[in-house]
Amino acid sequence: MSVTTPFGKASTAAEVLAGVDLGGRRAIVTGGASGIGVETARVLAAAGAEVTIAARDVAAGERVAAEIKAETRFLDLADQRSVRAFTEAWDGPLHILVNNAGVMARPLGRSPEGWELQFATNHLGHFALATGLLPALRQARGARVVSVASAGHLFSPVVFDDIHFEHRDYEAWSAYGQSKTANILFAVEAHRRWSPDGIFVNALHPGSIRTNLQRHVDAAELQRLRAATGNPDPEFKTVEQGAATSALLAGSPLLAGIGGRYFENCNEAGPNQPGTRTGVAAYALDPDAAARLWEISEKEIAQ
């Protein structure tokens, strides 16, 4: 049965967590120094959580942290050494992990390991972070992991034969799409593996929001893409609305014991219908693909 809530597209993160007490819980929000990450960190802190902003731009993170009474730690998801340093320095339980940071449709780049940079940042960095923090999540005895994906997953499945564009021509939106599909597949397999330990993992699409995530994409390109996908004039959400589904999955009691699912507009999404940019593609929830991606990811980050 699909999960439904009283909230919807216009709901804000503050509304979703109104009256929720997260006192005594510790949370990490990656990319919490900009965009919807700021609002996600803000509402978690306002609900009483002890929030750590994990950010590459420490100065920006510290400005946000000072405002919302959080802390900032350096994290570069595109560099596995940075991820290892972060996880090794973490001490004590972790109740909420919001894998929020990401890059979108950037020119071809490669991580220090030689991986395509969108996949390295959006998936492999967060995969290494979550698995590295697994002892802390287990210690929390009822943790949640939130994987911020996108309707952009509809642009591409994970192309297992050439994930890092070593043999095929690079196309920025395809690279972004498969990294977002990977975010959803991670939630599927992580929930299967970790739910017996009381760790519940879900993925989500936050909606269309004007943030610096689009810094590599000009207005004309966005309009061309929307027209091609049948959504030429989207209604943009505010940052407060864009963070609502993340907040719901991270802290609402309505999601207790729920995992392995994909949400949009504060409700579980149905199957994508051809010609639309809503819902979830079947390949993004495929348990066989999720298990295959997990095995590949483990081997990649072990190198």
Image: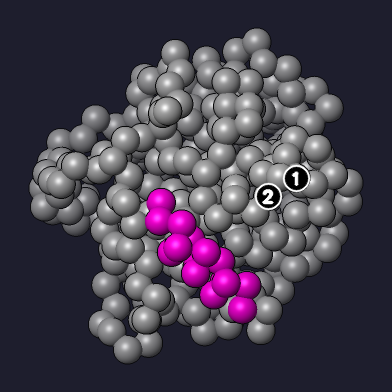
Which residue does the image show at 38% across and 20% down from the upper left?
A: 8
- Residue beneath label 1, please? 197
Which contiguous range is marked in magenta?
285-299
Which residue does the image show at 88% across and 51% down from the upper left?
A: 91
Q: Quadrant of the C terminus?
A: bottom right
User: Residue 134: x percent and y percent?
Assistant: 75, 54
* Prevailing secondary structure of the magenta residues: helix
User: Residue 24: x percent and y percent?
Assistant: 83, 27
In this rendered view, identify the residue nearer to me: 53 or 124.
Answer: 124
Q: Is residue 294 magenta?
A: yes
- Residue beneath label 2, please? 194
Q: Is residue 201 magenta?
A: no
Q: Is residue 181 above or below residue 8?
A: below
Number of numbered discs overlaid on the protein picture: 2
User: Residue 123: x percent and y percent?
Assistant: 52, 62
Q: Mark 1 and 2 residues: CB-CB less than 8 Å, in contact?
A: yes
